[in-house]
Image (cartoon, grey):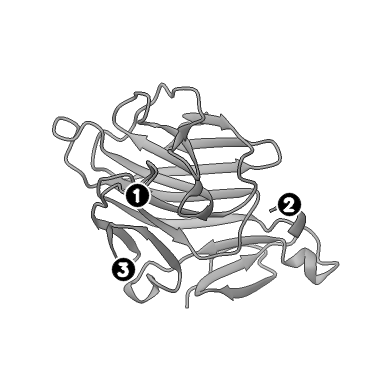
Amino acid sequence: MRTARLLRVVSVVVVTGCAVAIHPSTIASRLAMQESLRLTPRLESTALTSDWTLDGSGTWAAASGLLALVKPGTPAGPIRRPSALAIVNSPDLADTTLEVELRSTAALPDVTPRRDALLVVGYQSPTRFYYVHISAVRDDVHNGIFVVNDADRRRIDSRSDVAPLTDQAWHRARVVRTPATGRLEVYFDARREPIMVATDTTLRSGRAGVGSFDDTAEFRNVVVSGRVPDAGHR
């Protein structure tokens, strides 16, 4: 099994099939060593059930370091929410950073103007999570940050001026979530400033992942890092 290639790794443990590198701020106690995690889930067919939780009706495939949503899901059920998610199997995390390379494999905007890829943090269940909707258009329900809290998804950001998913090229994305302040920031490619920002404290911890609302997409070089919260702050 591959482990995360990191500097100053103190120890590596296995959490549900994922390689987890632990970065303690102090090595004074075993508890401190276990507070911070960095995970690199495997992107191969044998890891789809061990390293990932697949949520929704989409069809996923993984091979040679690539996770592909090859058939889009269909939104269904009592609440409006994304139809295909792949969530990294890990402990619930409070402070969370999700880094990933992604590309849309949906038809280009002249055919599919509302094409999308999603980044997920704070995932607690199929009806409780945050997701970042990256699209080729900006409107009330596309290209924004949303919370699903046992009800239809609700937008929580101010509208982004950047709708970058206009091609089928690879892009780098990063989501930074700080539950103590509710701050959620989204960075894209080489932009130094976030393309989206939201503040919300509904969900205090959860897991991270990727997906699409109702299109196809591919993902690679997925890294999740974060802090395991105390039992009283989950």
Q: Amino acid at mark 3?
A: Ser
The Cα atoms of the two marked residues, 2 and 1, are separated by 30 Å
Q: Amino acid at mark 2?
A: His
Q: Earlier in the sequence, mark 2 or mark 3?
A: 3
Examine the image and state in which quarter residue 172 appears. Answer: top left
Place of residue 107 in the rendered image (x, y in percent of width and height, measured from the top left): 16, 41
Place of residue 116 in the rendered image (x, y in percent of width and height, measured from the top left): 31, 40
Q: Which of labels 3 and 1 is toward the front?
A: 1
Dot 1 corresponds to which residue? 77
Above or below, comparing residue 42 to residue 228 in the picture: below
As rendered, which of 230 and 192 lies closer to the eye? 230
Q: Is 108 on the left or on the right of 62, as rendered?
A: left
Quick check: marks 3 and 1 in contact, CB under 8 Å? no
Dot 3 corresponds to which residue? 64
Examine the image and state in which quarter residue 143 appears. Answer: top left
Q: Which of labels 2 and 3 is toward the front?
A: 2
Pointer 3 local density, CA inside 10 Å: few below 14, some 14–19, many at least 20: few
The Cα atoms of the two marked residues, 3 and 1, are separated by 34 Å
Residue at the front extreme, as displayed? 78
Dot 2 corresponds to which residue? 233
Place of residue 219 in the rendered image (x, y in percent of width and height, measured from the top left): 35, 54
Place of residue 118 in the rendered image (x, y in percent of width and height, measured from the top left): 39, 44
SS state under label 3: loop
SS state under label 1: loop
Pointer 2 local density, CA inside 10 Å: few below 14, some 14–19, many at least 20: few
As rendered, which of 60 and 156 lies closer to the eye? 156
Q: Earlier in the sequence, mark 2 or mark 1?
A: 1
Residue depicted at x 41% and y 21%? 161
Quick check: marks 2 and 1 in contact, CB under 8 Å? no
Q: Earlier in the sequence, mark 3 or mark 1?
A: 3
Q: Is 120 on the left or on the right of 122, as rendered?
A: left
